[in-house]
Each structure stands twice: as C-alpha cells, then as structure tokens.
Image (cartoon, rainbow, N blue to C red):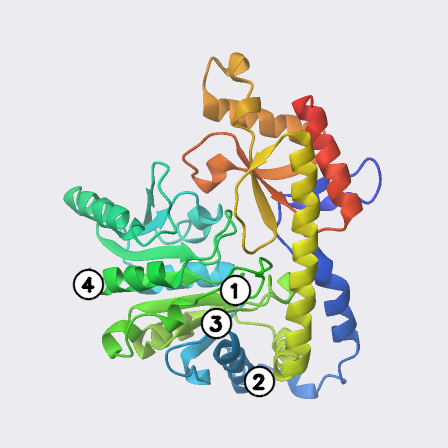
Amino acid sequence: MISARGARYDNPDGIVDFGNAENFLMHNLMTEYINHRRPFQWKLCTYNEGATGSTRLCSAMAGLVNDYFAPLTPISADHITFTAGVTALNEMITQVLCNEGDTIMLGRPSYGSFNKDLVLRTDVQLEYVGFNGADQFAPEVVDVYADALKQARERGSKVRALLVCNPHNPLGRCYPQATLERLVDFCVSEDLHLISDEIYALSIFNPTAQFTSVLGCGKDTPEYHNRVHVLYGMSKDFAGAGLRLGCLISRSKVVNDAIRPICRFASPSEISGFLAAELLDEKDLVKSFIEQSRKALFQSHRFAAGLLHEAGIKYYWPVDAGFFILMDLSSFLPLLETNGDAWAAERLLSKCFMDQKVDMSRGEVYHDERPGQFRLIHSFDQNMIIEGVRRIRKVLGI
C-alpha cells in the first residue's frame, strides 16, 4: 500500500490506485465539514472518558444505527464500543469469541484482509466456504454453510463464528432479509456467533436495492442478542478512513465487557471522536451527506461499468453498494506462460498491471473460487477512471 500511495496518479507517470477502497468522491465535502467545525476544546488533548469512545460519540452512533439500520429494539450507547478502526476490531472480536486454534467460517470470495486481521496475532483458523456457482445471497445458502460446518467439525475443527460482509466486499451485493433471518437462526441453533461487517451499510447506490442489518433480524431474546454482532465505522460511508474510528455494535454485555479492556491497545482518537460525534449529531447533514454520496457512487459506477462494457470486459452483476466492480478477466489469463496454472497466471497478469502502473486487488487474495477476478475501484473522478481503464485495456491488448 505504501508504494502505491507514494506514487499515486496525479501525473501521467503516477500509479492509478484501484486497489484501496475509499470514497474519494466525498473527501472534499468531508474536508469542508471538518474545516468549519467549532474550535476544539481542551479536553480533546486528554484521555477524556477512556479507551472506548466518549459517551457522546457512542450516543451519536446509536442514533445513526436506530435511524438507518432498523434494529429490532433501539440500540443504546451501552451497546457500542469504539476502537481505532474496524481493522483493529476484527482482531479484537476474534480474540474475544475464539480460543487459539478455533475456527471462523466465511464465504468465498471475502474481503482480502480478513486473513490478516483475524489471524496474524490470534492463532485462529479460517474456513472458507465455496458455493460452486450457487447464489450465495439466496436463503438456501444456509444449507451450504451447514454442510461446511458439519465437515469442519468432523475434521475436529472448533467453529466459533460465521463472518459475513453486508453489503458484500468484493461483490457489492446486499443480503436479502430472508437470507439473513435464516443465517441468524442457523448460528443460534448451532451455537455460533454471527459477525456482520456492515461497513458499507449506507453506501447503497442501486435505487432498487435495500440494506437490511442483522440487528433487525432474529428474535428479541437474550439468546439472539448474545450471538449477533455488527462491525461498523466512519471509513467508508463517511469518507473518513483517516479518522480511524470503528465500532462494535452488540447487545451482548458479555462481549462488550470482554472487548473494552483490550481497547487500550487501539483506543480511538479523542479528536476524531469529537469530529464524528459533531457530524452524527447533525441529522440533516448526515441525511444530505448520504444522499450526495449515493448519487455520486451511482454515477461513478455507471460510468466505470460503461467503459468496461465498451471494452468487452465482463464484470459481476448486479451490484447494489460499495466502491468496486469485480471484473472477470479469466479469458485474458496468460495460461501458456504458466503451463496452465490459472492462479499463477492471475498473479502474472497482476504483475503486468503493476508494470503499467495500475494497482488492483486480485481474486486469489479474496479466496475466490475462480481465477482471473480483479477488483476495480470506481469511486474516483472520471479522468482517473478513464486513465485506469485505458491502462487495463493496454495490458489486455483490447
């Protein structure tokens, strides 16, 4: 990331960074908001209320969740724990829910950094579940997870949780409520925790799509409350990756109480928390920001998809949310140069893209079942997208 960021495209010789998912379309508006805030108070230079976010910040986030996530019962500040980003939270929730050697299940493909965030310092195993072409967003997907769970247990794995991204990264789809209901019931019945990464919850740009949070699924009972946990933050929907603010949203007192002591190792910035609370407390501004972001994402996705269509490049469809398009470049893999090894060919094609200074994440990183998938970020101005697609076409010879 450092090398790509250090040479990012702002001149003909720079790198087009299609690898890191940020909403660059909204950075100017977010910056304008920050620059017009009232002066900081002296207490922002202190430890203030501790390592898990101020009461005001947690209350403001609870208000956002109640307004946009439609929970079964209202979320309160007590249900929210803040950390310095969802990356840190991924590790913390793993440490709390799992013992060394335990397993977390997740579907293919999945966000590429889970295999670092959840594993590097926890000694937890990941069980990637394939779907063999079936629709992983259909309610019947529960049967696939059930089979995978049975097989994992027969091998001696202690599966503690199922992790989903909703909206999905890298596919950009929202899970229907019927599917989420079955997933929640499945996890409760099998004594599993359901972790839902909902970091793109408000970045829905498909007018026909609807986001459903797992907080609105299941039953309003302790049995369900203790098993369902949401990860959220300011980095995607509010174009605030640099704020480093992520939060756990869970009705489980046990889980929150377990995570809070270790938040001291990744406590959120008081200044970032102040800026986020100020924004979230202004409900009209939040509504306007979300609406503008959705319009911008709709336009950028349509523009990028149009360029890919003109080039004859296939991509995953339909897409509801997020900042990315998953391209299917399997027909362009240089298989002759890798003796038919498709994954090696994908790695070689990725190197060819980097040689032309266009950086993209590839399917193997996401544990995709199909070689040749590349994720393109579309949340840029049109000139950046045009230049990036031009370089992609040059590599592909089309």
Q: Is residue 382 above or below residue 362?
A: below
Q: Image check: 383 left or right of 361?
A: right
Q: Which amino acid does label 4 sit on?
A: Ser
Q: Is residue 5 visible?
A: yes
Q: What element does badge 3 sit on?
A: helix
N-terminal of the pair, mark 4 or mark 1, is: 4
- Label 3 to label 2: alpha-carbon separation: 13 Å
In the image shown, does 311 or 272 lie closer to the viewer? 311
Residue assigned mark 2: 48
Residue 103 in sight in this render: no
> x%, y% of residue 249?
43, 73
* Residue with the mark numbered 1: 201
Q: Where residue 189 is drawn, which disc sits there?
A: 4
Q: Under tag 1, what secondary structure?
A: loop
The CA span between labels 4 and 1 is 26 Å
Q: Which residue is drawn at 27% across and 52% down?
A: 142
